[in-house]
Image (cartoon, rainbow, N blue to C red):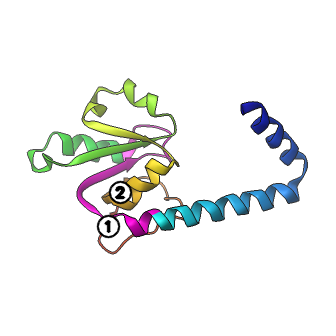
Amino acid sequence: MEQIKKHLRNFLKKHEGLRLIVRKVKWRIEEKEYDKIVKKTNVDDKLILFETFMGRQYGCNPKAIYEYMINNPAFDGYKFVWAFVDPEKALEFPALNRAETVEFKTREYYECCAKAKYIVTNSALNYRIQRKPEQVFM
């Protein structure tokens, strides 16, 4: 399967017009999938999703907010989730043992985006992720 993907990527690199069409179709499919997830998912008031630089690292303001929350008894009972491009990266940080991790831009990630009451990020969220009235984006 990886070989097929590799050949397809190489083919699309050579055919820019076709590559743009494939990209738009892929985005539209992802958008419809997210809409379905949103419709069937209720917001969990005790779920907080964190992401830094689109899932590339553990740092910046989301890290500071998360570390404050895990050390504050007011947030006992909350569920913390971190999104990473490579979830294995979370193993490098002992503070993340209180959090779950999800892989960035996967179905599980989008389900978490639709379910989280709070989303803490230091970068723009994917344009597909629309805030529900009861959600708070920081």
Q: Residue furthest left?
A: 73
Q: Nearer the viewer, residue 108 or 48?
A: 108
Residue 40 falls in image quadrant: bottom left
Kind of residue indicated by mark 2: Ile
* Horizontal arrangement in the rendering, residue 5 relative to residue 88 (left or right): right
Residue 64 falls in image quadrant: top left
Is 50 in the magenta? Answer: yes
Q: Disc 2 and disc 1: Cα gap in Å?
A: 8 Å
- 116 lies above or below 65: below
Is 5 in the magenta? Answer: no
Q: At x 49% / y 50%, what residue is drawn?
A: 107
Specify the label residue 135 is tagged with.
Answer: 1
Query: Which of the two discs, 2 and 1, labels the residue nearer the N terminus?
Result: 2
List x then y, in percent, for residue 51: 41, 47
Specify the label residue 119 is tagged with.
Answer: 2
Over which residues does the magenta segment extend? 37-61
